[in-house]
Amino acid sequence: MLITDLGPAYRGETSDETLVVTIKSSAGKTMLASVEGVNERNGAEALRGTELWYDRDKLPAIEDDDDTYYFDDLVGLTVLEDGAEIGQVTEVNNFGASDLIEISPKGAPAYYFPFTDDTVVQVDINAGTITITGSADYKDV
């Protein structure tokens, strides 16, 4: 499993502290894992909500023709609709339902936009653009 294959994880984006995580089993979105050096419940509870971070160079490469992206690669892309620039991607999140990009238009409030096959026409990492359709439905939500 990837999380085990990547080796030690950092405890946060800027942390030097690492954790060695081993996945014991998984079922759907739930995983049972062990963390090296954590042998009792209180130690495990103290890690609840900890974000795991890995060096980018340890992650698998993504093929250009694959419709798979690292969230970090989408941040900063120029958002186009009908050939016109409408803003920049400033964040990518998934709050449980689906992936969302946050679009920050110039001079207007930022808004979330679904990152789905129906709304995203093209992602061109090399050109630094993402082309979308239907943004008017999301600007004032």
Image (cartoon, helix red, strand yellow):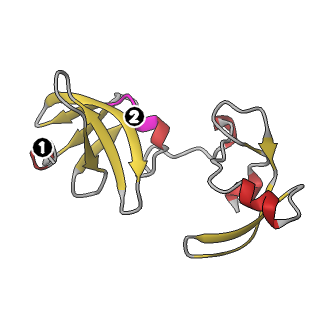
Q: Which residue is mark 2?
A: 125
Q: Residues within 10 Å of mark 2 (few under 14, many from 20)?
A: some
Q: Residue at x 39, y 34 (%)?
A: 125
Q: Quadrant of the N terminus?
A: bottom right
Callout 1 amino acid: Asp
Q: Residue at x 40, y 56 (%)?
A: 95
Residue range corresponding to the magenta coloring: 73-77
Q: Position of residue 63 (x, y in %)?
A: 51, 46
Q: Position of residue 121 (x, y in %)?
A: 23, 47
Sequence-earlier tag: 2 or 1 = 2
Which residue is at the front of the view, 128 or 18? Answer: 18
Callout 2 amino acid: Ile
Residue projecting furthest to the top: 107
Q: Are marks 2 and 1 in contact (CB under 8 Å)?
A: no
Q: Residue at x 82, y 51 (%)?
A: 20
How far, Cα to Cα, is label 2 from label 1?
28 Å
Residue depth check, mark 2 versus mark 1: number of the one nearer the observer? 1
Which residue is at the front of the view, 67 or 101? Answer: 101
Which residue is at the front of the view, 105 or 118? Answer: 105
Q: Position of residue 21 (x, y in %)?
A: 78, 56
Residue 116 as seen in the image, left or right of residue 8 = left
Residue 22 as seen in the image, left or right of residue 124 = right
The label on residue 140 is 1
Q: Is residue 88 above or below residue 98?
A: above
Residue 127 as seen in the image, left or right of residue 29 = left
Q: Residues within 10 Å of mark 1 (few under 14, many from 20)?
A: few
What is the chief secondary structure element of the magenta stretch? loop
